[in-house]
Image: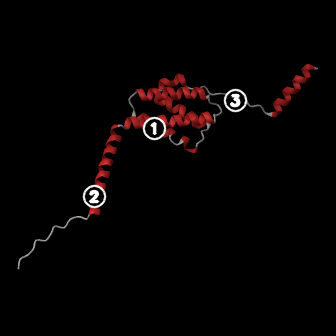
Amino acid sequence: MTEQPQPKKRMSKGCMVGMIVAGVLLIMFIAAAVTCWLKKDDLAKFGAVTLLDGVKSTLAQEPVAGLDTAQFNALADAFKLKLNESELDYEKYQVFFQSIQTIPSDEKIDEDEAWIIVDGMIEYFPDLEDYRPEPMIQESFDSESMDESEDSVEESTE
């Protein structure tokens, strides 16, 4: 009796396609991770710029009492310009981003949150102190003082 050679067992076509797809996905993942690592400065700067643009648009729609929106926008623009022109200081950036990242999550910015952002930008770049917005003082009148002032005006005209 002669033995016939047994044919080699091969992978099924479905398994081969699955292995090829998995290999391509692995290569794409490694390439994306390397690219993100090489561009981490640009990605971090992009995150800060995007966040500040969102804050600016929110403040344009709903201004905050006590903060001049035009001065805030000037500070934010100067900050973005300096951030894009300089090397990223990761320690300062981490402190800055942690202090402001949760602020716009509720789609509304109150006065305290706006001043936290202002302080964060100036702490990161102290030479932007010249751009610090002046707090706007809002005069509040209660009805009793209004009545008294009207009475005194009427008495002086008589």
Q: For mark 1, what is the residue?
A: 47
> Residue 35: horizontal and vertical position, in percent?
33, 40
Secondary element at image label 1? helix
Camera-near label (2 vs 3) is 2
Say which residue appears at 9% left-offset and 74% top-offset. Answer: 4
The quarter of the displayed image where residue 139 is located: top right
Q: CA distance from mark 2 to mark 3?
A: 68 Å
Q: Amino acid under label 1?
A: Gly
> Residue 12: horizontal and vertical position, in percent?
25, 65
> Residue 99: horizontal and vertical position, in percent?
50, 39
> Residue 3: horizontal and vertical position, in percent?
8, 75
In depth, the one of 7 and 93 nearer the eye is 7
Label 3 crowd bin: few (<14), some (14–19), many (20+), radius 10 Å: few
Q: Amino acid under label 2?
A: Met
Where's the C terminus, which quadrant? top right
Q: Give the farthest residue toward the left.
A: 1
Q: CA distance from mark 1 to mark 3?
A: 34 Å
Is 2 left, or right, of 47 in this rendering?
left
Say which residue appears at 47% left-offset and 29% top-offset. Answer: 80
In depth, the one of 81 and 117 nearer the eye is 81
Secondary element at image label 2? helix
Secondary element at image label 3? loop
Label 2 crowd bin: few (<14), some (14–19), many (20+), radius 10 Å: few
Q: Amino acid under label 3?
A: Gln
Q: For mark 3, what is the residue?
A: 138
